[in-house]
Image (tube, rainbow, N blue to C red):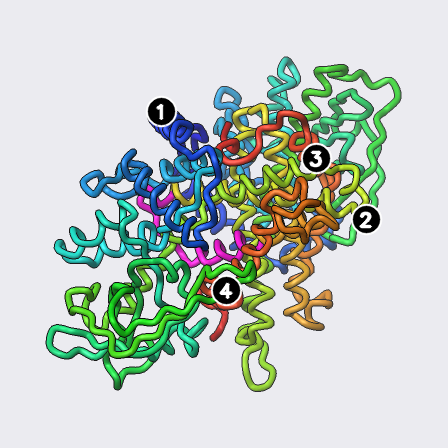
Amino acid sequence: MDFTFSEDQLLFQDSVRGFLVNEISPERLRAGWETDTGRDPALWQQFAELGLTGITVPEEHGGLGMDAVDFVLLAQECGYVALAEPLVNHALVAVPLLQDIGGELAARWLPLAATGEARIIAAVEQNLMVEDAHVADLLLLEREGQWFALEQGQFSCERSESIDPGRRLYTVTVPAGAAPIADGERASALRSASLNRGALGCAAQALGLAQRMIDLSVQYTAERKQFGKAIGSFQAVKHHMANVAVRLEYAKAPVHRAAYAVAEDAAGAALAVAQAKLMACEAANLAAKNSIQVHGAMGYTWEVDLHIFMKKAWALANTWGDAGWHKQQVAAVIFADGAALGAGATFQ
Amino acid sequence: MQLAFTEQQQAFRAEIRSWLQANVPAQTLQTFDTEEGFQQHREWEATLNQGRWGMVTWPEALGGRGCDLIEWLIFEEEYYRAKAPLRVNQNGIFLLGPTLMEYGTEEQKARFLPAMAEGRDVWAQGWSEPGAGSDMAAIRSTAQLQGDKYIINGQKTWSTRAVWADWLFGMFRTDPDSERHRGLTFILVPLNTPGITVRPIPQLDGLPGFAEIFFDNVEVDVSNRLGDDGAGWAVAMATAGFERGLMLRSPARFQETARRLVELYRANEASASHDPQIRDAVMRAYLDAESYCLSTYQTACRLSQGGKIGAESSTNKIFWSELDQNMHATAMSILGARAELLPHAPAAEGVGTWLDGWLFSQSGPIYAGTNEIQRNIIAERMLGMPR
């Protein structure tokens, strides 16, 4: 039993955090909202140089050959800066999916994914919208039980705007006559695996978002004075933030366990992921609720940065399976006859 | 990361499982808040000790097994699975025992630890006073050093198990000119010493689960002092440290409650479905109990690799106490009109022990530092918010 990350994994997290926090300021995010694509090729190039675009690509295709356990801490950091680039989808969902699909498609695209020359995006039926379809060099899309591999230019997409200006959401139309690359049971297995990975990515980012909202709130309430004192010294304000810290603290281990279950392709992965996503998104939603409260009227403005993280947290809670969908996964297991519950069942 | 038990850990689990199967009393013991039940639980401690299962984390030389935290969690899982009796001497073996090992003299260890392990000495705590609850540094009970004796005067209260316990450990003000957490001393007091009056306090269930204790010129030998004179606060903080907290409220307890809650819900699904919130609350109980388990394992693994426990550990008590309250509240909702019935009442079929658990869960957010105090600690020490 070893529920820890290796020193290398923690060092990688540290260095990526340093890079992201330096590079991706709220000002840079805001500037990105005003551009055509909302995405920054220069930043993607930097990710490639750091090895991030190829982190989950097998070594024989030029990547680092890492897995979900290696990546989960980095996904948390992506959440912490509200990263707009589709790195989590690319590295945690699309690249592993491409490996599962295998064959010529994988052989052709995995090396391009590793070098960052191609951004690969995956989406399943569960996602109402396809995120970042507009910048996908290759889109792996599941619709009505069939998977399609579509290159940019081979599909049309229509943008639907989100309240989160950092998100780019599209309704994708699969061209008539497109040949599916998988259907039937195989498609359904790919779909389950992708849903697990996508939901894990949301959960990990939610942890980072919640932490960022705590940090912003702690900083703001230390500066803002009323009645001659920093409002952060008042217990009513402290307890709002302490409540977030409690929920966040107990959402972390479920997310890390889910990463392990996904990496190991464990039988209980869907349950582990559902638990992780429910716990982490609940923590992030509570962080949003209590953070706007302690920011007072400033929290309700466009000017203060809190909303960048708050809106992303709201959105992720309903992406890659909303709470209802994940609760169904939990219910299917725990309310079944002969369910393994209780003391000693957790790691069975 | 490797989330599977080693062969050695699995063997350990099998060993405790089979011992418990052979030794856990077939008939549930009476509550230890009655005199007879207290005696039954004392005997159970002796049985555990004979099997060397009483204090598995204690060193082998002291009758333990030198278990690490992971083995401790496994032990607890099997213990709760087997529905083994609650630990009447948990104040002693989990709180005072490790503190004695750290601060006690060789003579003190020899004198107190074996008797504690065998269930001969059951220990009560003496922290709170009428004027010192959340504000523990406001302790006013005094212990005045005269020759080789401390003369104790004052009053302690909310002392759990004190009605039938043999000994009390607590803090007393030895420097009359001192203030707050300075000038306090940690002293071990035999409860049969002349000058001590123990007045039972009935709890919500009507039973005397705790007591107030009056000290009227009580003479205690100076050899009963644990740590240095005036160093009581540091000794007490060690007693209340995280690992001890983990030992008192290991996840197995809450996972078993969650499991029973799922069973209760399924057995009463037709009526429980009238309130759609119940199903969600049952799921939440399962998720939170599992998360508590996962977090505890993660922390235990980190500590066993030399990691340090940080201020985030203060989130622990809020999480389990609210979880326990929520689970029992859900059980009460499922039981509906039967929820208020005492277990032996003629119409109480199927109510189990939920009412008892519900009552006890009300104390969780209060004892061992109220949850409001915990929230202050989290905000100030973990998040760095201003005092």
Q: What kind of residue is marked 4?
A: Pro
Location of residue A220 with respect to A101 vertically, above or below? below
Front-lying residue, A276 or A16: A276
Q: Nearer the viewer, mark 1 or mark 4?
A: 4
Front-lying residue, B123 or B57: B123
Instruction: Give the labeled residue for mark 2.
Output: A161
Magenta stretch contains residue A311: no
Instruction: Give the labeled residue for mark 3.
Output: B266
Q: Nearer the viewer, mark 2 or mark 1?
A: 1
Front-lying residue, A157 or B283: B283
Please indicate whether residue B339 sits to the left or right of residue B111 in the image: right
Q: What kind of residue is marked 1?
A: Ala
Give yes or no for contact between labels 4 and 3 (Cβ–Cβ under 8 Å): no
Q: CA distance from mark 2 to mark 3?
A: 43 Å
Q: Nearer the viewer, mark 2 or mark 4?
A: 4
Location of residue A323 with respect to A232 vertically, above or below? above
Q: Judging from the image, what secondary structure is the residue with disc 3 in?
A: helix
